[in-house]
Image (cartoon, coloured by chain):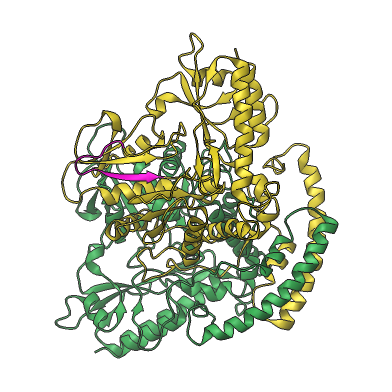
Chain colours: A green, B yellow
């Protein structure tokens, strides 16, 4: 697979420079033709996309540097670079976006709308994707956009906290919980809300419960554990997509959060969305985003819309139940195949090592795939039974593997979270190293 | 000018649909050629930009709807749609960006950098633009990127507040101050900082002073009014660009905030940057953005880099002191000409009406234009002397002009802030209506 190693450096740079020369020359000819056609047939900007190749480009970064056999392998964050191979293929071309210099300059997308900074094209593609996958009910819900689901999570806390000078709302989640929840809840020492820890240990009446399902970090299927008092649940469904878990029913909770980062792999686009039932809550969440960042990048919204469209269109071309061998235009099939293969390798490495354990596989009937499948979570929740290893994160770090220790998730130090979504190269080195530990 | 009215609706829609047919047909031929060339010469993604025109597009919004003679004219926000005419011209084509589906998927831009989510290409163009304009010293400063300067403002408050359980830091600014400062400072009831009002009335020792210069709302040149105790200043230089004010020297303050919204007109891109002297402060600001939104849209960063590059390249082609009549590739000259013309029309309307006053013109020697020029602020700070008009915002609203009342800026109700950056059409209707009031 191409992965993200091409732009990195070393020997590849010279080869790439030569290739760019060819590109530039072909592009120049195209540009000349396009320029002629543009002047002849229309006065607009549509040829600019062709012409621009003749201009010097602003080179984008390629993320983390490529790995080698001896590298530090960083699987701390859930950096979803596994998906790059898919988007370099046929479907990826249909996700290419061209934004002319004059486009979407206004703060506003739809000035009369509840979420006035939401691009209508993105809303349309979000609803279309949920209809395709069947993982959430979108009809009758307000769609909100955020700078990643992290911003929408904060918007939900803001919207659900009581106004006026009452005590801060308690924010809880059953351990092990996503390590960012406490940090993001508390970093501004808000008087509106405060982190109150493990939901299973909480016994107050006024709270927001964060329900992440499938769970980050352990992949388990979760329901709200607290049902009493004036509590409200926020459902973080970032991983409720068919490559990670069987889609057993269309979720229909009051507030549901999603993100392209974990659905399509476009983490750098920083684009999340929320489905919100109650109008007043949706309005307050929208207000948070207005105050925090005056809306959300339209460039990201247009790109996300194009990406989601390419996915849904891909299934319109090659239905979910079609030929199982051609996944070049079927994102969820591509990603599931990757996850199946990676989990098999990981379980084999764990068996070879003998000092680790993993959560059991959870099977279920997937309405999207229309068959019974296992869950293949985006994170491995890896536990070590070896005597003396009380700080597994440190133990792995000494072996040049960066993971995130259990303590950050409200769990113990003998367990870590490992991203399963990095490049093929990084993942292969990781499982090799793991298999050799004993 | 083309402005943003094309996509709006009504009679224009059908005409546009017909035009799209032609575009699609031409594009299809281009696509076929490109497809052939791509297969023949290289296996990459470079022809995708051409091909994609043959695919159905995700239509972007066009912001606020177009205005008519009887419309409500909304000049409440500083929506910078005035700039669209420039970007529809020659320079705009050079600012077109093409983002393939596989690009910048990682969370990271430069994993080892202080601001790990900052695209190196954007940093380069930011530094290059400041060198061209001479409005700020960038050498020796850290460059940070934010989701608009609004996010960077909050990042600065977070970074400058003392850690530990002390009382919240006081945040002040001399009245009239930007109306968002109090709201954004206080909306989360942070225990780290709190709004403490007019800097001129403040007499504590521990504070952050926000210095907006040229000032939003009144266009005045400001320096920190508080110089005692442990206070720190944050300089909001969103409007310190040569179209609005003479560039009298290169600013070299500890923390300086900028945004493309008011420099280039791309508000929808939500992209700001900060120049920060102190490494520890820059690190904490970066941490804020990590916690708040896990970085900043790379699509916006790549687009902003391309836009800033087009501006600087434009001056490389046609130097600042060149032919004064050709502004098609010189953004600051284009925008200054607009501002001069609009302020002349506004002052004429105010004179015709007889019930309004405006701040005096402030001249100065501009090192960028290399001549003495007047300031032409992006907002008009309009005062009404008519008896009985104590709520000027309400008075104008009855006349279908939406402005922002003085009370929101810590001033009185007989003054309002009016955006000078809307479309030509909206501005023309506004001055006509104003001239008729008496």
Q: Nearer the viewer, residue A187 or A161?
A: A187
Q: Nearer the viewer, residue B145 or A204?
A: B145
Q: Quadrant of residue A396?
A: bottom left
Q: Residue furthest top?
A: B387
Taking B212 as reference, is A364 above or below it?
Answer: below
Residue at 47% across / 58% down in the picture? A270
Q: Which residues are magenta?
A: B225-236
- Name the residue at the left extreme: A388
Q: Is residue B165 above or below residue A132?
A: above
Left or right: A105 as drawn, with respect to B218: right
In this view, the residue farthest toward the right is A40
Q: Position of residue A109 (x, y in %)?
A: 58, 43
Query: The C terminus of chain A is located in which quarter?
Result: bottom left
Instruction: Between residue B97 and residue A195, name the one nearer to us.
Output: B97
Residue at horizontal 19 percent and vertical 54 percent from the top = A201
Residue B231 magenta:
yes
The N terminus of chain A appears in which quarter of the rendering? bottom right
Q: Position of residue A288 (x, y in %)?
A: 41, 42
In which quadrant of the rendered view does residue A38 lie?
bottom right
Q: Can residue B114 be seen at all in this image of the molecule?
A: yes
Question: Is A112 in the magenta?
Answer: no
Image position of B286 (left or right of B64): left
- Residue at the spot 35% in from the left edge and 47% down from the top edge: B154
Can residue A254 be seen here? The reply is no
Provide residue A403's location: percent of width, then percent of height. 30, 74
- Residue at x 24% of width, y 85% of height: A355
- Residue A206 location (% of width, % of height): 25, 41
């Amino acid at each position: 697979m191409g992965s993200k190693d091409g732009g990195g450096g070393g020997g590849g740079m010279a080869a790439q420079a030569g290739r760019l020369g060819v590109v530039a020359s072909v592009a120049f000819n195209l540009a000349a033709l396009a320029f002629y056609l543009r002047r002849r047939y229309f006065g607009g900007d549509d040829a600019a996309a062709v012409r621009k190749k003749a201009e010097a480009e602003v080179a984008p970064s390629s993320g983390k540097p490529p790995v080698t056999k001896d590298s530090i392998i960083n699987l701390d964050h859930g950096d979803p670079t596994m998906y790059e191979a898919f988007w370099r293929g046929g479907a990826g071309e249909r996700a290419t976006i061209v934004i002319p210099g004059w486009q979407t300059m206004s703060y506003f997308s739809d000035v009369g709308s509840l979420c006035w900074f939401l691009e209508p094209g993105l809303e349309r593609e979000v609803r279309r994707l949920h209809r395709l996958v069947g993982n959430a009910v979108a009809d009758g819900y307000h769609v909100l956009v955020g700078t990643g689901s992290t911003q929408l999570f904060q918007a939900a806390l803001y919207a659900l906290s009581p106004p006026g000078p009452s005590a801060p709302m308690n924010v809880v989640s059953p351990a092990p919980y996503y390590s960012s929840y406490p940090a993001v809840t508390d970093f501004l020492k808000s008087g509106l809300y405060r982190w109150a820890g493990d939901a299973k240990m909480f016994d107050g009446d006024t709270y927001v419960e964060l329900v992440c399902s499938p769970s980050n970090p352990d992949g388990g299927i979760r329901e709200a554990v607290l049902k009493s008092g004036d509590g409200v649940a926020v459902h973080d469904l970032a991983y409720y997509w068919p490559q990670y878990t069987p889609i057993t029913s269309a979720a229909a909770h009051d507030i549901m959060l999603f993100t392209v980062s974990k659905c399509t792999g476009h983490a750098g686009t920083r684009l999340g969305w929320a489905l919100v039932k109650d109008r007043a809550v949706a309005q307050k969440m929208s207000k948070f985003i207005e105050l925090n960042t005056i809306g959300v990048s339209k460039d990201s919204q247009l790109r996300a819309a194009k990406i989601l469209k390419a996915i849904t269109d891909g299934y319109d071309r090659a239905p979910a139940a079609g030929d199982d061998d051609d996944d070049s235009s079927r994102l969820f099939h591509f990603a599931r195949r990757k996850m199946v293969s990676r989990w098999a390798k990981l379980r084999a490495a764990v068996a070879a090592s003998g000092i680790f354990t993993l959560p059991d596989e959870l099977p279920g009937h997937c309405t999207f795939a229309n068959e019974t499948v296992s869950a293949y979570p985006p994170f491995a929740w890896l536990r070590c039974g070896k005597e003396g290893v009380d700080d597994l994160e440190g133990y792995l770090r000494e072996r040049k593997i960066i993971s995130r220790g259990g303590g950050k998730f409200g769990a113990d130090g003998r367990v870590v979270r490992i991203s399963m979504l990095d490049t093929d190269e990084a993942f292969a080195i990781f499982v090799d190293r793991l298999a050799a530990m004993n």
